Amino acid sequence: MKNVKYMQTEEKPLLTSFESEQFDTIMDKLISILLLFLTIVGIPYTVYLLLELILIYL
């Protein structure tokens, strides 16, 4: 019988697909779109909730 060493291959990091420049640019664009969406939707909704809260206790 041969003395076989298992797992002789190099271990690669699990998240190597997230190292590309294209992935970085896509994620930057996605984050900026999400922040813009949350700003446009979040501010009026917060004002609405505050007005509802004020009107309930008047």
Image (spheres, rainbow, N blue to C red):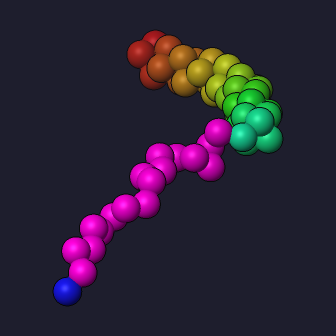
The answer to which of 3 and 38 lies nearer the viewer is 3
Query: From this viewpoint, is residue 33 visible?
Result: no
**Residue 9 part of the magenta segment:** yes
Quarter assignment of residue 10: bottom left
Count of residue discs: 0
Bounds of the magenta segment? 2-19
> Looking at the rendering, in which quadrant would you find the N terminus?
bottom left
Residue 46: x and y in percent read 59, 21
Residue 15: x and y in percent read 52, 46
Tell me what residue is drawn at x 55 percent, y 24 percent. 49
Query: From this viewpoint, is residue 3 visible?
Result: yes
Vertical side of 58 occupied by 2: above or below = below
Quarter assignment of residue 23: top right
**In the displayed structure, does residue 51 sit left or right of residue 2?**
right
**In the displayed structure, does residue 7 sit left or right of residue 10?**
left
Residue 18: x and y in percent read 62, 43
Residue 45: x and y in percent read 63, 27
The answer to which of 46 and 17 lies nearer the viewer is 17
**Would you say the magenta stretch is mainly helix, strand or loop?**
loop
Tell me what residue is drawn at x 67 percent, y 20 percent. 43
The answer to which of 50 and 38 lies nearer the viewer is 38
